[in-house]
Image: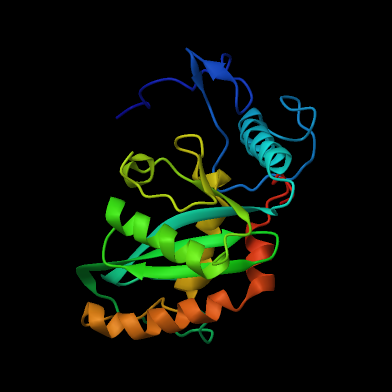
Amino acid sequence: MDKPEGRGLDRSDLGPAGARHDGLELSPSPYVHRSATASPSSPSGHSRTTAGVQKKIQALIDDLKTLHPDRPVELWFQDEARLGTKSVLRRCWAKRGVRPTAPHANGFEWTYIYGFVHPFSGRTDLLRFDTVDIASFSAALSLFKARFDPADERLLILVVDNAGWHRSARVVVPPGVRLVFTLPYTPELMPAEHLWIPLKEGLVNRAWPSLQALIEPLDQRCVWLMQQHALVSNLTSFHWLPAA
């Protein structure tokens, strides 16, 4: 080849992150947790997406406090994680000049953790189920309610994503629990997603010969994480969350 083919990238029509092109909105990376520093597209320091979710949740909190002034209102978030016999690999420390090794398995047996978190206090409930479906989600809601409000004295706002087993009309929602759905395709707005970082950290770089071999270490890790209120609150207390 005597000379390279093609031409340079024409950047003349590219705008800033978040600008609209042909009717599509380009979002910044979901892995960047942006601070409250003001940006040209958001004078208040919040993106339009974040502000919309914040207003929706705050409006519900205000309505519930007005209708039930004698009952405390708490804001919770919920998510699920899949873990199994396929190893989770992470970087690790090693002596200089030594290549670290880690066992690895490509199994296909799975279990699921249903996580509930109250960001402001760091309280967490982690429940293990064999699958994700309407029946399991309904059972998880019932257990969550029984463990954190057995006397039905509070109003629990529970923010979940748009998974089919969350939105089904067949979901049994306990009294005193109100489900709120996030915007589609916005995992960066879900504080409960951050529960899985410390949970998986205690299970990485290991090979599990069977799902049963994973269960006990996983349960122990869940118990440990439910006791780490300060750590959980630090990971999940997003700056834009309404106070509840």
Residue 89 can be seen in this image:
yes
Is 162 positioned to the left or the right of 85 in the image? right
Residue visible at 79% across and 34% down in the picture: 38
The answer to whether residue 100 is seen in the rendering is no
Above or below 82: residue 222: below
Residue at the image position 65 percent from the left and 28 percent from the top: 48
Q: Quadrant of residue 65?
A: top right
> Closer to the camera, 10 or 89?
89
Q: Position of residue 228 (x, y in %)?
A: 62, 76
Q: Is residue 119 above or below residue 50?
A: below
For the point 37% across and 27% down, which residue is it?
A: 4
Nearer-the-camera pick, 211 or 91: 211
Taking the image as shown, residue 18 lies to the left or right of residue 137, namely: right
Question: Quadrant location of the N terminus?
Answer: top left
Q: How is the image coloured?
A: rainbow
Q: Nearer the viewer, residue 231 or 100?
A: 231
Q: Is residue 106 above or below residue 166?
A: below
Q: Is residue 130 left or right of residue 63?
A: left
Count how many numbered circles sit on residues in the image. Answer: 0
Give the image location of residue 170, x and y in percent. 30, 43
Residue 96 rendering spot, x and y as whole percentages: 54, 84
